Amino acid sequence: MFEPSGTPRVYGLAPGVDFPAALVAGLRARMAGRPPEEMAKVELIVNTSRMKRRVLTIFDQGPATLLPRIRLLTDMADPAALRDLPAPVPPLRRRLELTGLVSKLLDAQPDLAPRAALFDLADSLATLMDEMQDEGVSPDEIAALDVSDESGHWQRALSFLSIVQRFFEQGEEAPDRNAFQRYALDEKLKSWEVAPPTHPIIVAGSTGSRGGAYKLMCAVSRLPQGAVVLPGFDFDTPGPVWGGLSDALSAEDHPQFRFAKLLFDLALDPVGVPHWHEQAPPSAARNRLVSLALRPAPVTDQWRSEGVHLPELTGATEKLTLVEANSKREEAMAIALRLRQAAEDGTTAALITPDRMLTRQVTAALDRWDIVPDDSAGIPLQLTPPGRFLRQVAALFQRELTAESLLSLLKHPLTHSGSERNNHLRATRELELHIRKKSWPFPQAELIEAWGAAAGFPDWANWVAETFCQPPLHGTRALSDWLMIHVERAEAIAAGPEMGESELWKEGAGRKARQVVAELEGEASHGTDLDARDYADLFGAILAKGEVRDRDAPHPHILIWGTLEARVMGAELLILGGLNEGSWPEIPGADPWLNRRMRHKAGLRLPERNIGLAAHDFQQAVAAEEVWLTRALKSDDAETVPARWVNRLMNLMNGLPAKQGPEALKAMQARGRHWLALARQVESPIKTPSAARPSPVPPVAARPRQLSVTEIKTLIRDPYAIYAKRVLRLRPLNPLQRAPDALLRGILIHQVFEEFVRETVSDPGLLTPEALRAKAAEVIGDPEVLPFPVTRHVWQSRIARIAEWFTRTETARQQIARPVHFETSGSSDIASLGFTLKGTADRIDIDEKGNAHLYDYKTGAAPTAKQQKNFDKQLLLEAAMVERGAFPNLQPRHASRAVFVSVSTNPNEVEAPLDEVPPAKVWSQFETLMTRWFEPDRGYTARAAMLSENDFSDYDHLSRFGEWDVIDAAEREMLE
């Protein structure tokens, strides 16, 4: 196949060339005229499974031929050599072993790192081990580094590195997968040195970024019939620039650095690298432009000297579009619109980006048109329904069951999926309403069982109590024990009380989850003892490594690829998304073990290598036939920085007016603005007229015939709230986790003062600040009543602060009259209207003359006398009800006094103006008021007379407040 040569054989294919198609075409051309069986002798080694599938697809398109043997770089072991090597350890087992070793080290030396960093350290250590195995670097070489200026950190790092020493010593421990591949490759290369293969062997598509791949490429290039085909080789880079790509510390972020290193190590001149096939790139002019833009920083002065020799740039960038969106959402929508157009035209289009958040946004945007893209990364297993379900069940072991965690699991689609799912959802709804009504932050088994018996769901409630209401598990357990408990509980929750066959392990995601759990069960004996939190973290991290793909659901022409897959090509339109610094290229992750200089000395990969590989992927993709470059100007309201390659390209074009560079750039941006305008049009809401300020007029028969004294204030200030509550019968839905709000504070503080005053009546010796503080501790300090430690402390402190004032003024109050009635309810009728006013007095004292003294506790500021006369009529109406005999077992001669007792931060007493508005007059005014409210044309105007424009109403959203203002005239609507 190849002519004998005294030098290694290395070929290249230019950026933008369809690499698999050109690879096959070049192979066919070299095999032309040879016997058909010669093709079957060719051994083709490619870098990814996707590349292998694409090559096979191209061969399948004809003409008919025998296929070469196609293998992956990761599958180079010789079966004969494998007999002498121990079987590799599964990656999960090695990770569990490392977790246990790091855990023991942290137990022995707690000052090395916090316990919370256990899994991060184990993961990072496993990654470093894989890299050391791949690059052939032993722990002894790491330990021998000169780190005299970093001794403190280095000693801590060595403590961790020492625990993995035994994994590098062949013979003591079975090798992990990377070590096994390195041993197998070494054996194969040794056999080639003794007996070089005579059949053609071609390594294609790899950049040699990993140590094992690099060694293989060097060895294959020297074989009698071996060759290496480089993807995206820049034939436009001049010799002097190649010569400058020799130092990794300064040049490894260049897209062609890995090729330069390979060629220099093989003693080859990069300028003389031949083409594997003469297939031309889609735009040779664009390749020259990009090549010049990506020159190393020290030689960017060549932009001036070589830029004048570039062809006219409007033609070079004719099929290049630059989309600069205002936000990531807008960027995703523009991309989705272009992909939709491609789907309608039958064009194969691929979005290439390392930004997984962007791909999810694009996928969500495409969903509105029922387009499911073929995402090569699939869906992370932890985000699938079984993954989320299993993680939620694992969280139950860590803490007391909360209302939120209970209901989120009950509503999960896999819960109670065995049978009678409809009845389960009905019971869940009723339980949720009950929990919200009763404010159970931590539902208890006996409470749920009692509710179930009363509501008609006894079996279901018993199942909930048994499977969900279990105490948290404390202490450490073996990983196998955790898995057994976890799986049993998850299956019980998924099956339901009838224990039918659930959907947990079904469908693609369920089968994948079952596979991961089974693998973890098989390796659990190699794990360490864990507590509940560590187990949940470990389980979630293992799920995160799995992915689920449905090959049948996606659209055949709409693809989402990672940056590595840009080499596979095959799409007519490539969209390079998320081109901002920190996204593409990604920010190198923090390395807790070795800094940049130490990595270079040890022979490990520098952070710049990943940047260089990302740059190569960009150079390869941007040379395709039609390309979009997209980025967001802002991300999370922060300005973004364009990717360095886009920045260089724009700067170079702006600096070449003689080649129409600025005009070409503006044309690229104009094409992008067209799609951005479409995206904004799609996202723009449909204009609808603003709602008018409502004033509904319901029929008189539908109006409320009963109100409480506290609702009269609402009727005057916000009639619409009474309409919504009493006519429409709408109630605000209580939160699941009831916050310690003003309402709860008022209820508990009222209880404190009521019980305290009751006790002082029977025992006056208890009327002391100390006794009041003790009562507050008894009521508010009960965790069952108020399960918020900080709030308990704050509210008790508030009462303690006013205890002396309250006991002093309470002494004066009891000298005037004796407390007799507490929380007394009563009602009074307006017979002519058929209306009843109801009320509950906090406290009514009776003096020696038989007169009533009314007191109402306020946790906030008490209303002024003027506010009471016009709006807040609660105490005035209660006084009038007293004189009308509205309260049972209470027949005083006269309501002598009514007082608001404010127990806020600034306590005081505010008397109701009974001298200005006596009870009889109050009732007469009230009858007039209610008569007006029964007039047929009287409307319930929203926010009619709020005390402050910032006051909140539970029904503001229903009245669409915000679309109208309080200065707007109300629009009456007659209802039938």
Image (cartoon, helix red, strand yellow):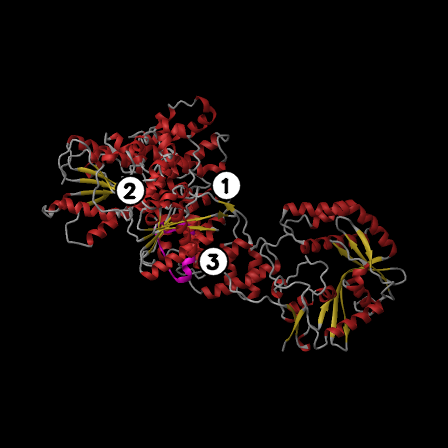
Query: If you read the primary sequence from the N terminus, does the residue marked by circle 2 or circle 1 appear first?
Result: 2
Q: Which residues are magenta?
A: 365-384
Does residue 385 appear anywhere in the picture? no
- For the C terminus, the quadrant is bottom right
Closer-to-camera residue (838/475): 838
40 lies left or right of 255: left
- Which mark is on residue 232? 2
Amino acid on which disc 3 is placed: Arg
Above-or-below relation of 157 to 18? above
Q: Neighbour class for label 1 at 10 Å: few (<14), some, many (≥20)?
A: few
> Residue visible at 38% across and 40% down?
525
Image position, residue 534 (x, y; %): 47, 42
Image position, residue 58 (x, y; %): 22, 52
Closer-to-camera residue (344/425): 344
- For the N terminus, the quadrant is top left
Q: Secondary structure at mark 2?
A: loop
Q: Which residue is mark 3?
A: 680
Closer-to-camera residue (277/283): 283
Q: Which residue is mark 1?
A: 475
